[in-house]
Image (spheres, helix red, strand yellow):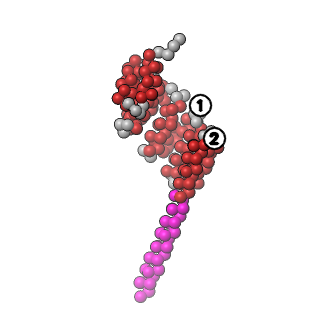
Amino acid sequence: MGIDTYEVMYIQARDNYPYDIHECIEKLQYVIAADDEHAGAHCLLGQIYDEQLEDYKQAEYHYRMTLYLNREYTPVYYQYIWLLIRHNRLEEALKIIDIGLTVQGIEEATMMYFKGVLYEKYEMYNTAIEYFNEAKKKCFNNGFMNEMDDHIKRVKDKKALIKKLSKKGDSKSKRKKSKNKKKKAS
């Protein structure tokens, strides 16, 4: 038993992305018209709507369709989670991360990275750093490990900035209070 024509077209669509979007979309439409339950085609179409067309509703539709058709299709988790995070739908993203962590073959390091980003968005910087470190423990790639170091540095820089700004704010409010006391005393 060989690979059917629709699988070949799907592979060609993947090969064309992102270099020849027109050809990619054409092949994906053909695949979905022939097999509307092709999870990979829906996922890639979602990615095109997300990254190229910036039609986030259609992107989400195709990501959700992919999950409906095949919860084990790991690439959709990375795409869908990132869409949710970028749109500040953090609770939903956390749920998808937790579901993804139960899927065999999911890259746990990437899921820990996403949790780190989520907690960074929540401004829970120590927790974010913990997840970035957890991602480092679970990865098998030096480049990914270096990226986590960069994320940790960024979060630490944010913490230092917030601390610095809060000290400035405290000193300004102290100066205002002392000026107000002097005015009242006069």
Q: Residue furthest bottom?
A: 186
Rendered position, 133 above or below 72: below
Q: Residue at x 61, y 50 (%)?
A: 130
Q: Position of residue 20 (x, y in %)?
A: 38, 30
- Label 2 SS: helix
Residue 10: in magenta span? no
Rendered position, 165 above or below 32: below
Quadrant in which residue 50 is drawn:
top left
Q: Position of residue 108 (x, y in %)?
A: 59, 38
Residue of label 2: 138
Depth check, front residue: 87 or 134:
134
Quadrant location of the C terminus? Answer: bottom left
Q: Residue at x 44, y 80 (%)?
A: 179
How crowded pointer 1 is (Cα within 10 Å; few <14, some 14-19, many 20+) is rated as few
Amino acid type for the residue under numbered disc 1: Gly
Quadrant in which residue 31 is drawn:
top left
Q: Position of residue 58 (x, y in %)?
A: 37, 34
Q: Does residue 48 show up?
A: yes
Separation of marks 2 and 1 at Cα, in angstroms: 13 Å
Q: Residue at x 42, y 28 (%)?
A: 16
Answer with mark 2 or mark 1, whichever residue precedes in sequence.
Answer: 1
Residue 124 horizontal side relative to residue 5, left or right:
right
> Which numbered tag is attached to residue 105?
1
Depth check, front residue: 83 or 1:
1
Q: Does residue 61 show up?
A: no
Q: Residue furthest top?
A: 1
Rendered position, 12 above or below 135: above
Magenta region, residue range? 158-186
Q: Position of residue 178 (x, y in %)?
A: 47, 80
- Label 1 SS: loop
How crowded pointer 2 is (Cα within 10 Å; few <14, some 14-19, many 20+) is rated as some
